[in-house]
């Protein structure tokens, strides 16, 4: 994917670095953010050797398969609004994936995009907060998309839950167009982050309401039923004893049964 060709398709303001391989685009973007790199500095890698997901999990990131992208953001929002970076990015990614495929695209709370009930995209936002003001210094928005089927298929441990946006093999032009569409969608949605303007669309795209789930807390798996998404993007669930709990993004992960 040529940098110059991709820049021609992007809105203005994106400072783009394209790497063949790296440990983690989020790691590189964070280092640049600490060094004062401007907002919308974007790192893209063809392959990651240590791709990261939420809760310390790894993200399968082979070459010539996915899009691995991290963007530095500097929104003037307080820490308690930071979740909206992730949820807005999920809405943006769902829009682009929906336009690229005729599958049923949904958001699995809080940060995964599913296509026909299989994961095709994960989002990880890492932020630094000014302890004195409570506002963000910066945020690194990381997005990993399974664009094409990997040679030999997905590893056995994720084969039943992972899929790709396109069912074909790697194609440079398709990847460039998808990448440009995603970055442009993010840039378009970004000015409204912090204003709670995406919650209705997020709710309409949610995979969760009415589904039996497990709440994953450490090694514990707690069965529950997902009820609804709140206006603060929390997930309301009913436990086996009939009690209702509201889950935030920071302390749990959800696995669809």
Image (cartoon, rainbow, N blue to C red):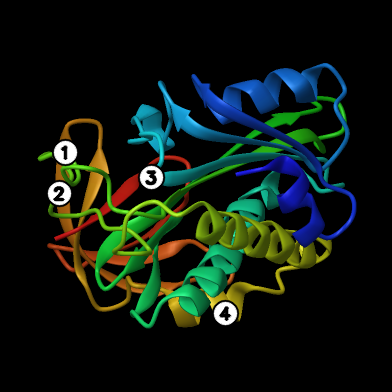
Please tell me in which quadrant of the rendered image residue 4 appears.
top right
How far separated are the C-alphas under marks 3 and 2?
15 Å
Q: Look at the numbered disc 4 and give the secondary structure of its residue.
A: helix
Would you place residue 161 above or below residue 227 in this image? above
Tell me the residue that label 4 is attached to: 201
Q: Look at the numbered disc 1 and give the secondary structure of its residue.
A: loop
Q: Look at the numbered disc 3 and give the secondary structure of its residue.
A: loop
Tell me the residue that label 2 is attached to: 159
How far separated are the C-alphas under marks 2 and 1?
6 Å
Query: Do the CB atoms of the residues marked 2 and 4 lie less than 8 Å apart?
Result: no
Residue 87 vs residue 1, the one in the foreground: 1
Q: Which mark is residue 155?
A: 1
Image position of 102 (left or right of 86): left
Residue 243 vs residue 59, the one in the foreground: 59
Report the residue at 60% width, 74% height from top.
Answer: 199
Tell me the residue that label 3 is attached to: 65
Q: Which mark is first along the chain, 1 or 3?
A: 3
Image position of 111 (left or right of 214): right
How far separated are the C-alphas under marks 2 and 4?
29 Å
How far separated are the C-alphas under marks 4 and 3?
29 Å
Query: Do the CB atoms of the residues marked 2 and 1 lie less than 8 Å apart?
Result: yes
Other-residue count near label 1 (Cα within 10 Å), few / some / many at <14 / 14–19 / ≥20: few
Image position of 234 (left or right of 19): left
């Amino acid at each position: 994917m040529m940098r110059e060709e991709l820049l021609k398709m992007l809105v203005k303001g994106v400072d783009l670095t394209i790497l063949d391989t790296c440990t983690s685009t989020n790691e590189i973007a964070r280092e640049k953010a600490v060094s004062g790199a401007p907002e919308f500095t974007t790192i893209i890698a063809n392959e990651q050797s240590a791709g990261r997901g939420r809760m310390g999990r790894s993200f399968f990131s082979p070459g010539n398969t996915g899009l691995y992208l991290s963007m530095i953001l500097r929104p003037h929002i307080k820490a308690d609004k930071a979740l909206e970076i992730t949820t807005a990015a999920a809405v943006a990614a769902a829009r682009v994936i929906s336009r690229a495929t005729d599958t049923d695209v949904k958001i699995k709370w809080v940060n995964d995009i599913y296509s026909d009930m299989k994961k095709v995209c994960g989002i990880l936002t890492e932020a630094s907060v000014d302890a004195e003001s409570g506002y963000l210094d910066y945020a690194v928005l990381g997005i990993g998309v399974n664009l094409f089927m990997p040679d030999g298929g997905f590893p056995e441990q994720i084969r039943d839950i992972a899929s790709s946006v396109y069912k074909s093999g790697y194609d440079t032009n398709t990847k460039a167009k998808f990448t440009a569409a995603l970055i442009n969608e993010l840039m378009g949605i970004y000015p409204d982050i912090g204003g709670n303007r995406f919650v209705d669309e997020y709710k309409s795209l949610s995979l969760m309401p009415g589904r039996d789930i497990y709440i994953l807390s450490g090694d514990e798996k707690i069965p529950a039923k997902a009820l609804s998404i709140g206006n603060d993007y929390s997930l309301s669930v009913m436990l086996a004893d009939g009690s209702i709990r509201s889950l935030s993004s920071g302390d749990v992960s959800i696995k669809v049964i």
